[in-house]
């Protein structure tokens, strides 16, 4: 009883605190032009109720987290049903098959508008998976990821504009250019610790954007480049619908390719080195892993994917300008990775679909999108750092013995 | 010569503001080794609160520098409250978590606060009333240094002297220094470490708010996005001087301010905002510990 009273009192206090905190920004709105003050008292009540309810939720979640940590300390390994299901290989293959069929049938069932939305979701899937190599596997917090995306997009736009390069020819070029930039930028800075790296890479986007805006001879400035060719298919003329569907299929192929490569990479020698590096740098170096090279390879590989998707993005929108490559884009990609689960391929895919499709279909809430992303990043870190779907560690079992006993 | 002096004082003004914000980064980093990404947003909130208070006061008939003082004080109180709450919500539950976690949480908080102000107020630039009058005694040198610049310099210097006294000569300052040197040891000798961390956030936020109010009244406009660039530049200043070092933050701020001012004055202002990043990358490659910082050895 006293506990309940204590909780209640605390929640009331928190509620009052937040009312105080949000008062000037939520309630008062000044128009200095017309000298009018607008008082929005209703907001105050919403804040009070919201803070009261949320404080209860917060306490509950914290208590649950502590309880879980205790259980984990006692050594009981808990796995949810979903987790167990995901580890079942035969289920995974079946699910993948079904998903692939759905993905292939999608543009036949839905109209062009839906397909366009799906394309952008798939673009973010590949971007998320690419960033996941750096952030999720190697633990390099890269806030400038979108700069490489921009490098790819601009390389296609410029090569197409000046030299009439086709989409298929530029696709690998864009990837390689992204990769090259990744190596060039990554080389000097990858010695830095995680938080420095974050802020320097943040600088890259700002530099990229400013250079693209000011160096008009190269990039046509803030007005951007228009009339970029869509991808061609052996010279066949396509109308808008057909080419959207075509791009969609290219994108699906790219997603499958990315998934295959990242999956194989994760279990390779270098993938293990990345994960080890993320867990403990010093121990890793002591074990003889070349830190600079390993980090650089993660960074450059991520940039490669960003570059390739950039080419596709330019081909899809047929118009690009520097405003498409801002920190906010990077933040969205990062929240996809964080929300989905750092290091988990399935999680990142799911995260991309949730974060891109949800605001798309809930237009009423789309202005709250970034607010929710920010809050979600904080909450995820506190209550579920492993993301929606945590990374599944590969386990190897010795099967030989079992067969023998069955036979004999 | 006059042009040079004008640029010199322009850089000094700009640099002292960077220094004010950089102090918050450097103090927090010194204690918990975290880049408080949301620090720039605290600065922005400080400026915004000041704008709102100043707007309301103007409409209700106050005038002149008294508004600036009242608005400044309220802004400082609010920014401190935001800083305190920020630490409690986004960083405290993550103490002891892997390094990446609080950093991501900080980035999330920064995005959240930006959009909170965007939604609660407006996405547009709001004009900030001109509150600093032209002093008569500044007339002869007005073409080199204006009255607003003078006010900014005086306030900044006073704040920094106050901060130095606080850290060097008071009990709280001693506890802060102890926590910075060794957190667990400080706890053993009876320092309430949690409270010191909260206090560091409060002081850092207050300094940022002072910077915010000064910049807003100097530039004459505010929007939800100003914290981002200012935050990154101030962080550059902190790293430039050597992160974790308080005199370093001031020095770094001034060097950055002058670099920007002279580059914009003599070369071109197109790439002004990028200069800080170029400088940052350069320092981190050549001398990651900064001008005044000591290279910390990592113990295992």
Image: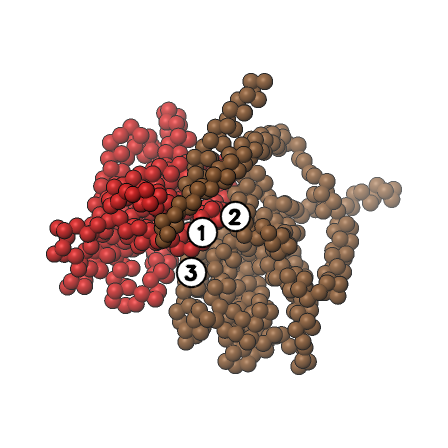
Chain colours: A brown, B red
Q: Which residue: 61% across, 49% down?
A: A340
Q: Residue furthest right?
A: A408
Residue found at x 72% / y 47%: A86
- The image shows residue A24, relative to residue B133, as above or below, that is above
**The numbered mark 3 sits on a residue in which chain?**
A
Badge 2 or badge 3: first in the primary sequence:
3
How far from the left and from the top, in percent, is residue B124? 42, 55
Q: Residues within 10 Å of mark 3 (few under 14, many from 20)?
A: many
Q: Which residue is mark 2?
A: A371
Read off the residue under disc 3. A206
Residue A292, percent across and down?
A: 47, 56
Give SS at disc 1: loop
| Labels 2, 3: one chain | yes
Q: Quadrant of the N terminus of chain B?
A: bottom left
Residue B193 placement: quadrant: top left
In the picture shown, does residue A267 fall above or below A303? Answer: above
């Amino acid at each position: 009883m006293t506990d309940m009273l204590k909780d209640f009192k605390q929640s009331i206090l928190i509620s009052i605190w937040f009312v105080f905190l949000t008062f000037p920004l939520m309630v008062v709105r000044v128009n200095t032009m017309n000298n009018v003050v607008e008082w929005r008292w209703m907001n105050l009540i919403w804040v009070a109720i919201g803070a009261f309810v949320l404080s209860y939720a917060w306490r509950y979640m914290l208590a649950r987290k502590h309880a879980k940590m205790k259980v984990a300390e006692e050594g009981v390994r808990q796995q949810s049903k979903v987790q167990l299901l995901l580890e079942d290989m035969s289920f995974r293959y079946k699910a993948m098959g079904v998903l692939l069929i759905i993905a292939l049938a999608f543009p036949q069932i839905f109209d062009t508008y839906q397909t366009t939305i799906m394309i952008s979701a798939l673009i973010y899937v590949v971007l998320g998976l690419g960033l996941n190599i750096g952030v999720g596997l190697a633990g390099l917090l890269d806030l400038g990821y979108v700069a490489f995306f921009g490098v790819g997009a601009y390389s296609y736009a410029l090569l197409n504009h000046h030299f009439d390069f086709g989409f298929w020819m530029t696709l690998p070029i864009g990837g390689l250019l992204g990769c090259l930039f990744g190596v060039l930028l990554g080389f000097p800075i990858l010695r830095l610790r995680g938080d420095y790296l974050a802020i320097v890479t943040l600088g890259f986007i700002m530099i990229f954007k400013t250079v693209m805006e000011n160096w008009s001879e190269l990039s046509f400035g803030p007005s951007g480049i228009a009339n970029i060719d869509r991808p061609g298919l052996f010279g066949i003329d396509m109308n808008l619908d057909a080419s959207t569907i075509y791009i969609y299929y290219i994108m699906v192929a790219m997603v499958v390719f990315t998934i295959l490569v990242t999956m194989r990479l994760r279990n390779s020698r270098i993938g293990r080195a990345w994960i080890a590096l993320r867990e403990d740098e010093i121990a890793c170096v002591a074990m003889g892993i070349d830190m600079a090279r390993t980090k650089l390879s993660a960074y450059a590989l991520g940039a490669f994917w960003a570059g390739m998707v950039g080419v596709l993005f330019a081909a899809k929108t047929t118009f690009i300008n520097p405003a498409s490559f801002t920190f906010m884009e990077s933040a969205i990609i990062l929240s996809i990775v964080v929300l989905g689960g750092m290091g988990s391929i399935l999680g990142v895919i799911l995260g991309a679909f949730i974060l891109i499709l949800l605001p798309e279909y809930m237009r009423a809430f789309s202005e709250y999108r970034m607010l929710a992303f920010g809050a979600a990043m904080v909450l995820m870190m506190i209550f579920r750092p492993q993301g929606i779907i945590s990374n599944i560690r590969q386990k190897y079992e010795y099967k030989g013995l079992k067969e023998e006993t069955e036979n004999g | 010569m006059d042009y040079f002096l004008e640029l010199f004082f322009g850089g000094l003004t700009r640099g002292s503001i960077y220094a004010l914000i950089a102090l918050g980064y450097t103090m927090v980093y010194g204690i918990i080794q975290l880049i408080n990404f949301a620090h720039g947003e605290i600065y922005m909130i400080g400026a915004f609160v000041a704008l709102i208070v100043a707007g309301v006061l103007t409409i209700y008939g106050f005038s002149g520098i008294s508004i600036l003082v009242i608005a400044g004080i309220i802004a400082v109180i609010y920014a401190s409250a935001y800083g305190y709450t920020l630490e409690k919500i986004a960083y405290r539950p993550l103490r002891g978590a892997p390094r990446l976690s609080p950093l991501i949480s900080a980035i999330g908080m920064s995005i959240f606060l930006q959009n909170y102000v965007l939604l609660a107020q407006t996405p547009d630039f709001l004009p900030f009333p001109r509150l600093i009058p032209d002093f008569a005694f500044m007339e002869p040198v007005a073409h080199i240094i204006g009255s607003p610049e003078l006010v900014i310099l005086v306030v900044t210097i006073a704040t920094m002297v106050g901060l130095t006294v606080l850290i060097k000569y008071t009990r709280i300052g001693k506890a802060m220094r102890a926590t910075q040197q060794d957190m667990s040891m400080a706890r053993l000798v009876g320092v309430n470490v949690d409270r010191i961390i909260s206090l560091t956030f409060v002081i850092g936020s207050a300094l940022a708010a002072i910077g915010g109010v000064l910049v807003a009244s100097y530039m004459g406009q505010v929007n939800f996005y100003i914290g981002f660039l200012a935050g990154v530049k101030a962080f550059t200043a902190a790293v430039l001087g050597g992160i974790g070092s308080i005199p370093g933050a001031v020095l770094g701020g001034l060097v950055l301010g002058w670099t920007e001012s002279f580059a914009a004055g003599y070369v071109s202002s197109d790439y002004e905002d990028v200069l800080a990043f170029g400088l940052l990358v350069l320092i981190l490659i050549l001398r990651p510990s900064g001008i005044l910082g000591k290279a910390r050895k990592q113990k295992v």
